[in-house]
Image (cartoon, grey):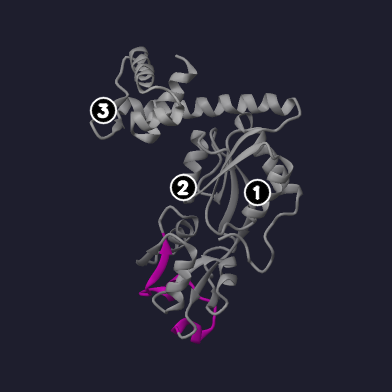
Amino acid sequence: MELRHLQHFVAVAEDQHFTRAAERLLVSQSGLSASIRALERELQAPLFVRTTRRVTLTEAGRALLVEAERILAQVRSAHEAVAAVQGVLRGTLSLGTEQCIAGVHVARLLAAFRGRHPDVEIRLRQAGSGALADEVAAGRLDLAFAYRTQADTDQLRSVSLTGEPMTVLCHPGHRLAAAGTVVCPDDLTGEVFVDFHPDWGPRRTTDAAFAAAGVRRTVALEVNDVHSLLDLVDENLGIAVVPRHFRHKRPSLTALPLKGTGETEYETVALLPPERATSPAARALVTLLETGGLAPPQDGSQDT
């Protein structure tokens, strides 16, 4: 099995199309097809289901994709490690982040990193914490800034950034704002909730807090960006339970402490692969974060 076979396989799996994958790899379609057939012969299993419109992975193909991505990530890390020993940091830094993550100003951090390491190509994507953890563990991302979704494993480790309590946001005309007091999950029974997709860190935190309190809640308005959530609450269409720093993004809303769920249950972390598999670029970024004083300002005006 050759590395180029795995590279060709991953490209076809990503594009779900032989022609597009061949164009991206700058190889002929016939050569790409031959490479995939050679891999299938060696593994004695079909890797794709081919149709006239696209190709999809077989069960064997899905199993191989996980390992192929991990192998290619390790090979890339090996090349970058050798370059780093020679005094040059180059290659690619693939970074993931949730929106409005606490404890780090992502744009400022990446700008500082680029200033120090101009030969490193930076790639960034936003997603929910669950998906980001999976991508770091699989080797598709070098690191991610996310909510802690699980304990450290042999494929994933975490560096804590910050912890903060959850806060209830509501319209100033809402009954909760009129009461102006600390609230518990029991106080919110029957309320209409605005919240994020279940893969997002704040949603996972809130779901866990209400489940622990034995309080059922219904998310009637589900969004995938912070400003849409704030707009809906601002129109008094529902309330939201969010990390405390969100309150700075819309000062016109009323923010009420949520008690009975722990004081710092929302923890954000940098997710990384095991130390041996961490790329030099990822190490340099974490070092910059830890020593460069690049945390967001106290007024909460950080990345969105």
Residue 188 belongs to magenta span: yes
Single out the mark in the foreground, 2 or 3. Answer: 3
Q: Nearer the viewer, residue 182 or 144?
A: 144
Residue under circle 2? 130
Residue toward you, 14 or 232? 14
Disc 1 or 3, which lies upstream in sequence? Answer: 3
Q: Is residue 197 above or below residue 41?
A: below
Amino acid carrying mark 3 in the image: Arg
Callout 1: SS: helix
Name the secondary structure under disc 3.
Answer: strand
Question: Real-space Cα distance between discs 1 and 3?
Answer: 40 Å
The residue positioned 42% from the left and 79% from the top of the image is 236
Indicate the quadrant containing the N terminus: top left, top right, bottom left or bottom right: top left
- Is residue 71 covered in magenta? no
Horizontal relation, residue 181 to residue 46: left or right: right
User: Circle 1 sits on which residue?
Assistant: 110
Question: Can you tell which of label 2 and label 1 is closer to the viewer?
Answer: 1
Q: Between marks 2 and 1, how big is the CA–CA gap? A: 23 Å
Relative placement, left or right, of 207 versus 152 is left
Q: Which residue in the structure is indicated by mark 3? A: 50
Q: Name the residue: 45% across, 27% down.
A: 25
Q: Which residues are magenta?
A: 174-196
The three-letter code of the residue at mark 1 reads Leu
Using the image as rendered, state which of residue 209 and residue 148 is in the foreground. Answer: 148
- Quadrant position of the C terminus in the picture: bottom right
Tag 2, which secondary structure?
Answer: helix
